[in-house]
Amino acid sequence: MFKDAPQAPEGTAGETIVGNSVKLEGDLISDENISINGKVSGKIATSKNLGIGETAEVKANIEAENIVIAGKVEGDVKAREKLEITETGKVTGNISAKTLAVSPGALFSGQCVMEGEGKTEEVEEEEAEE
Amino acid sequence: MYFYIYDSFTREPKYAKALNKISMALADLDIAGEEVRCTPIRKVKDLIKEGVKKGYKNIIACGDDSIAQKVITSLATLKIRKKDLCFSIIPLRSSKIAQILGIPSIDAAPEIISKRRIKKVDLGKLDDQYFLTSCSMGAGESLVKLGSFWSKLTFMTRSVRYPEIQLKFKEGFKVTVRPTKVGIFNILDYHKGKLSLKTNSQVSITVSPQDGLLDVIIVSKLAKFNLLRYLADIQQNNFEKIPGISLFRTKKVTISSSGPIPITLDRQKVEKKRLVCQVIPQKLNVIVGRERRF
């Protein structure tokens, strides 16, 4: 269950939601939270939070403040703050975040860059599945 | 200065008492004005032109959503230089627009109009028609009622065969989906336009007619069991209970399909294969009550 998805703060005026059987192509650029459960190809960028559900298949470079991935992503992922890959998440591409959380069972294949307190560390890693 | 446009159905004898009551209330509140009735010869657009020419600043539709929709479209399409024209409604029959504007009944209407609480709102434009609240498209839109067994069966059959539609958004992306229903909202018929949706997490959104955007809500194709289960919710736009909702906010969307799409526009029904829907920001002044839904 996608319980730890970044929650929209109280009073948020809007959100973009891509439902299960929806196919989206193109650049999804927003100032609001985005929640994806369908198929997306292109580019995704938001100044707020992004949640990718278990049923989602994303072929796009993505960028957001906080990102939680529980589905399949092919592309580069950039989280300005926190990136979380849950046990059902699969990421193929490079990732970049200040804080990274990878759950047991997650799949990740690519380079990982973590920025913290002025120090940039490059970590090349292929995360194993359990 | 008030210009009251009555729908043709108000000619019926059963409305005589109500019309007398309104006239007296308007006179008591000192907002009586010219009263006209639309006929097959004197259409709403012509009446409004006449009223504006005479200097009336408040155009009040008296009837239901049908006359309100015609007045709104006429006010939006006529090249009227006066920026302070206001619209409101006296509901003589059940009216969704009146409820959304916070005018709950025929008795409350005169006082609300006299108080002149004015809000400037966006309008939606569907090809050459304007709408204040919403338009929706889907398998159930061509059915008058979904109460009977046969209409429910027809709805389910049509939903299963409903063609794939493509929505091309001005913001730079396109969406392909086989929907049960697509709703495009300028105003949402919920408490103050707030809606809680079940997605990965519980999200709360606000649909506002003053934000320069339309909210496109898509109910994806549902399994037969869920279709039956959520039938009433789908028809009543009760999206909070329905799973798998999609939501996009846009200034303009082009919708196309291989087959004709039945559309309901502020309760009026049409069918189109391709349509363009966009928001016209800050287009209309409306007189509203305290209980308005935005």
Image: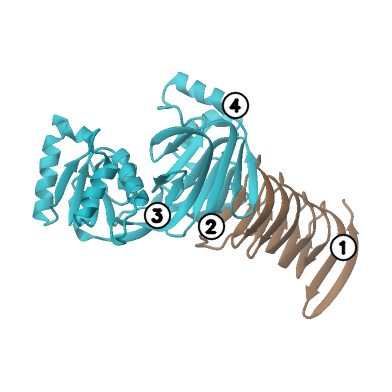
Query: Quick check: marks 4 and 1 in contact, CB under 8 Å?
Result: no
Same subunit, labels 1 and 3: the answer reads no
Mark 3 vs mark 4: in front: 4
Three-letter amino acid code of the residue under disc 3: Lys
Q: Residue furthest bottom?
A: A118
Label 4's element? helix
Report the chain shown in cyan. Answer: B
Same subunit, labels 4 and 2: the answer reads no
Residue in the picture at 62% in, 35% down: B178
The local crowd at label 2, few if under 14, some if 14 to 19, many if 20 or more residues have their Cα within 10 Å, is: many
Residue, disc 2: A14
Measure the alpha-carbon separation of dots 4 and 1: 44 Å
Q: Is residue A106 left or right of residue B266?
A: right
Q: Position of residue B199 (x, y in %)?
A: 60, 48
Measure the alpha-carbon separation of dots 2 and 3: 14 Å
Q: Is residue A37 visible?
A: yes
